[in-house]
Image: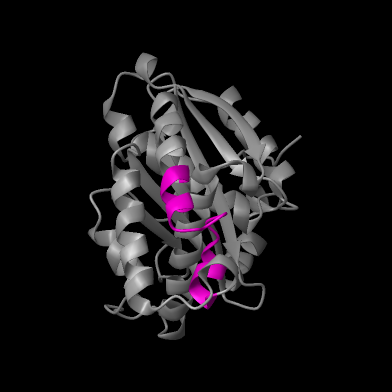
C-alpha cells in the first residue's frame, strides 16, 4: 500500500491556491514519522508549520537564514531516506473561474478539487507509480482536516474509483488527519506553502520565464527526492478534460464526470 499525504495552501487574497505532498509505502511512512520526530525534537520544534518557519514565528523565532537553510537540508535528508516522491498542483483561481464558467462539467469541482485531480492523475499516469504493476500499488490519500471543500474531494474520489481504469494503479481510500497528529502532513504543508508562494511570484510576471527561486525551494529541488510540479493557468492552450482513461502527458488535463457529481 502506498499513501500520499496532501495539504492545501491558499493566501486568500493571492492569485493561486493548490495542494501538494508526498507519497511513500505505508511502512516507510512509519519509519519517517519516527526519525522526523526525533529530528524535530532535537531542533526544539514541536510542529513543522511552513508559515511559522517562513515568518520566524513560534518555534522558529530568532532563527537566522543559515540556521533555516541547515534545518531544511537536514529535513530533506531525513525525508529522502523514506519518502518516494513529491507532487504539487497550483491553480490560478481567476483563470480557473473563467474555464469553469465555460464548461458545465466543472461546476462542482473547486480549485482544490482540480488540484487534487491533477495530483492523482500525475501519480498514477505520469510518475513512477504508472510504470509498476497495478496489483502492486494500491494508492490511498490522506489529506489535512479542515478545508471546507474536503467533502468535494470525497465525492470526486468516489467517482474516480467507480470509473477507474484497470490499466492504472488501483486506488485505495481517502481519509483526513489533523496537522498536529502527523509529521507526514506537516511535510506536505511545508511543500504546498512554498510551491504556492513561488507560484504567486511567478503569476506577478504574467507567467513569463521565471528562473529565480526562494532559498527554501532551491534546497527542496536540490534534494534527492523527485518532485513533479503542475500549474493550471491560462497559458493560451486549450484546457483539456479527458473523457476516457488513457496515458497522457498534457499539462492541463484531468478527468471529470460528464454530468457533475451526484
8 to the left or right of 86: right
Q: x, y percentage for residue 157?
A: 61, 34
Quarter of the picture containing the N terminus is top left
- Outermost residue toward the bottom in this view: 205
Q: Of 135 and 49, which appears nearest the observer?
A: 49
Picture quadrant of residue 153: top right
Residue located 31% across and 65% down the image: 70
Residue located 49% across and 61% down the image: 90
Quarter of the picture containing the C terminus is top right
173 to the left or right of 136: right
Q: Is residue 218 visible?
A: yes
5 to the left or right of 75: right
Provide the major secondary structure of the magenta segment: helix
Residue located 67% across and 44% down the image: 178
Q: Is residue 243 visible?
A: no
Q: x, y percentage for residue 14?
A: 59, 77
Q: Of 50 and 94, which appears nearest the observer?
A: 50
* Highlighted range, magenta: 37-56
Q: Of 125 and 184, which appears nearest the observer?
A: 184
Q: Please tell me whether residue 49 belongs to the stretch shown in magenta.
A: yes
Amino acid at each position: 500500500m502506498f499513501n500520499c499525504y496532501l495539504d492545501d495552501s491558499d493566501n486568500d487574497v493571492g492569485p493561486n491556491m493548490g495542494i501538494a505532498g508526498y507519497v511513500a509505502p505505508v511502512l516507510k511512512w512509519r519509519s519517517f514519522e519516527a526519525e522526523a520526530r526525533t529530528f524535530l525534537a532535537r531542533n526544539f520544534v514541536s510542529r513543522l508549520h511552513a508559515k511559522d518557519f517562513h515568518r520566524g514565528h513560534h518555534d522558529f523565532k530568532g532563527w537566522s537564514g543559515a540556521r533555516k537553510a541547515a534545518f531544511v537540508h537536514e529535513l530533506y535528508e531525513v525525508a529522502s531516506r523514506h519518502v518516494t516522491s513529491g507532487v504539487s498542483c497550483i491553480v490560478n483561481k481567476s483563470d480557473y473561474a473563467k474555464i469553469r464558467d465555460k464548461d458545465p462539467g466543472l461546476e462542482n469541482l473547486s480549485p482544490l478539487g482540480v488540484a487534487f485531480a491533477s495530483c492523482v492523475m500525475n501519480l498514477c499516469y505520469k510518475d513512477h507509480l504508472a510504470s509498476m504493476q497495478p496489483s502492486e500499488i494500491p494508492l490511498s490519500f490522506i489529506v489535512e482536516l479542515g478545508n471546507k471543500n474536503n467533502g468535494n474531494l470525497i465525492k470526486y474520489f468516489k467517482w474516480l474509483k467507480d470509473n477507474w481504469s484497470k490499466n492504472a494503479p488501483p486506488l485505495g481510500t481517502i481519509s483526513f488527519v489533523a496537522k498536529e497528529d502527523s509529521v507526514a502532513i506537516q511535510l506536505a504543508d511545508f511543500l504546498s506553502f512554498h510551491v504556492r508562494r513561488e507560484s504567486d511570484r511567478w503569476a506577478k510576471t504574467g507567467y513569463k520565464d521565471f528562473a529565480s527561486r526562494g532559498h527554501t525551494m532551491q534546497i527542496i529541488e536540490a534534494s534527492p527526492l523527485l518532485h513533479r510540479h503542475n500549474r493550471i493557468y491560462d497559458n493560451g492552450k486549450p484546457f483539456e478534460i479527458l473523457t476516457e482513461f488513457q496515458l497522457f502527458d498534457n499539462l492541463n488535463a484531468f478527468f471529470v464526470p460528464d454530468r457533475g457529481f451526484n
